[in-house]
Amino acid sequence: MSHVVSLESHAGIAVITLDNPPVNALSTAVRKGLLAAIEKADAGSHKAIVLHGAGRVFIAGADIREFGQPIEDPWLPKVLERLESCSIPVIAAIHGVALGGGLETALACHYRIADAGARVGLPEVKLGILPGASGTQRTPRLMGVQAALDLMVSGKPIMSRQAQDAGLVDRIAEGELLPAALKWASELLSEGSGPRRNSDLLVDTSKLSPGFFEQYREATLKATRGLPAPQAIIDCVEQATRLEFTSGIAYERERFEELVRSPESAALRHAFLAERKAAKVKDLPADTPLRPIASVGIVGAGTMGGGIAMSCANAGIPVTLLEINQEALDRGLAVCRKNYERSVARGRFTGEEAESFMQRITGTTNYSDLATADLVIEAVFEDPDIKKTVFQELDKVCKPGSILATNTSYQDVDDIAAVTGRPEDVLGMHFFSPANVMKLLEVVRGATTADDVLATVMKFARTLGKVPVVSRVCYGFIGNRMLAGYFREAQMLLLEGATPTQVDQALESFGMAMGPLAVSDLAGLDVSYKARQAIPDIPDHPSVHVADQLVEMGRLGQKTGAGYYRYDSATRKRQADPEVEEMIRAEAKRLGMAPRTITDSEIVQRVIYPLINEGARILEEHIAQRPGDIDIVYLYGYGFPKWRGGPMFFADTVGLKIVFERICAFRDSLERPQDWQPAALLETLASQGQTFRAYQGW
Ligand code: HSC
């Protein structure tokens, strides 16, 4: 029929197979092929149709890469209308996943059978859009208003049994799916059951309380920070309760088209594709061999080591956790246990699951117990000499071929590798705290890291459920290196006249999960203070004066109940503190800086543009592979709002020329021009009218 859709006959039943690897996305070719196959099957001598997918899934949805371009005919809603109108029964056979347009396709079929392990869902909201091929109109007809809203507003898939209970799936296949679907088709035919169109159903509104939609809207608005897609989904479902099917579809189409053009959707689609791209290393051949990782050793049972151990244990990997003495080891293991207990109390794991995870973590104080580990991750104190000593020990005891990783946030991975006799087996694995929760993993590729070591760790990161991004070696790698300017400007703004509350609120309104000063209080102001004290002859920079004084006043942040803010001991809620504001004014006066009124928009530019500028330098120096990789680091490790796509994507939406000119204006108007030198790459792209999106990197 077509290279992506085939039609075969099985004893009078037409089997239409979609074969568009890797996930049977509904690209133009698939839609064309499917429409042609439906027409042929319906017009011929077939008695029923079974629709299924080749490969690992039924259909993962519309082809995300086609959004943002003119949609070619036939549109999916048209294909599905034709599918539903078939004069013979059509059965969807679902395995793997039926997501987005994939589930909408299944819902347009007359009957649905699924594998017990299949998942179905409408995750469009995560891409800033709504189900645009009848999903908002069909789901409330089949599963009721509340359940349909929950499915679409959360975007979370459900298992096929849950879908069966909810009315989305009719049967769970026993044994192999396709034979079960064919058998069911024969049964339906022998019973005389014909097409069953859910567009003929009415939405049941009998159980809806008065004001239901208003209440749902309000609750969603708070939970989704006012993003447009969830609200549009609610509007569509409300219309489904009022309009007949075809008018509901027309309304859904209108709202879909509005959303697909929105900047939020463009950013979320970018984030989806950039995340998958980041997992690929440009110069590694696809067939690079992988080393097996069946066991992991971790050196250091502190916050990071314990978190990494839990992350491995949760993924089914046995861990040996090493500490310097029994007391420190017991403390580390007790923290892991407590964290698991907390997860059980929150309902994240069952008690048995938590116990089985804990069983996978074995403690030791003896390096020789790490001898057989396939991967050892060092997570000791951030001191280069201590780290080097650990690597010398590991080099002595670990079997040949085991991968040795450092969880350093700043140190030179090449220097660490050089103390071993096997620098090719060494690389950085920079986890983010808490390591059992945070998804980002910066994989630091040293100058001598072997290809198979890098490829193995990239794959292993996915096994842990992490989002890996490759960074070359530099101080702070991608994420922390960029932070320097971000924090510098947040602190300079205080001296120039802004309050901590104003700075943090401006950035939180921009969408950051937490403002930079509140983040500093959370992390502990003493951490960076000690790091500064440890650098001999560190040049004085006024930006750290306030932070230094806070530490010297005993205000270390949340842990002491006071930092930039004062914290309520029960709720941990932050409150502005006049004592701090007075100290800031006194310090500014001492430095001869007169306070001025600063707008929220200047605050955002002053704090976010240094991220973009440093990101451009990181690209120039080939530290990051692509602008999208930098975005992923910020989305998954630093609380940058996903709906803005990351700092580099955000720069494109502002326009690189505008960003560049503003950076130059800050250079020319602020006291420290050396802090605002524009990156050469930014200047080049701005002058060429280019975007980071189009920049291919190295
Ligand atoms: C949608 O369906 C909108 C509808 O309502 C229709 C609207 C029509 C309106 C018409 C006009 C009115 N497209 O994640 P993985 C690629 S929106 C293209 O690493 P896994 C992915 O990029 C869509 N490509 O694998 C990667 O490519 P690479 C709603 C897609 O096993 C490869 O597949 N659906 C794609 O960890 C492997 O992906 C979704 O949001 C797609 N839809 O997870 C589902 N989906 O090899 C999104 C995947 O080149 N997808 N790719 O790197 C997923 O959640 C996951 O990919 C899976 C697989 C769970 C499917």
Image (cartoon, grey):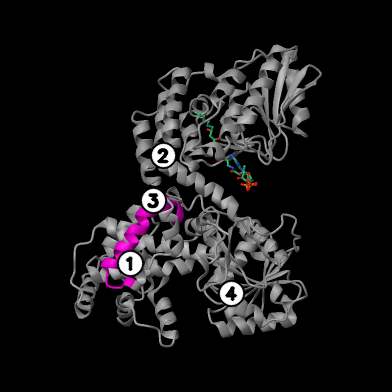
Instruction: Tell me which residue sits at (68%, 41%) in the image.
Output: 22
Please identify the quadrant where the C terminus is shown. Answer: bottom right
Q: CA distance from mark 3 to mark 4?
A: 40 Å
Q: Closer to the camera: disc 3 or disc 2?
A: 3
Depth check, front residue: 416 or 158: 416
What is the span of residues highlighted in magenta in the rendered image? Answer: 647-673
Give the prevailing secondary structure in the magenta stretch.
Answer: helix
Residue 70 in percent (x, y) is at 50, 32
Residue pointed to by mark 4: 379
Q: Is residue 404 left or right of residue 154?
A: right
- The answer to whether mark 1 and mark 4 are in CB contact below 8 A is no
* Quarter of the displayed picture in which ligand 1 can be seen: top right
Residue located beneath label 2 in the image: 262
| Residue at the spot 67% in from the left edge and 35% down from the top edge | 58
Q: CA distance from mark 1 to mark 4?
A: 30 Å
Q: Which residue is mark 1?
A: 490
Alpha-carbon neighbours of circle 2 within 10 Å: few (<14), some, or many (≥20)?
A: some
Mark 4 surroundings within 10 Å by alpha-carbon count, few (fewer than 14), some (14 through 19), many (20 or more):
many
SS type, badge 2: loop
Residue 419 image-quadrant placement = bottom right
Q: Earlier in the sequence, mark 3 or mark 2?
A: 2
Q: Earlier in the sequence, mark 3 or mark 4?
A: 4
Circle count: 4
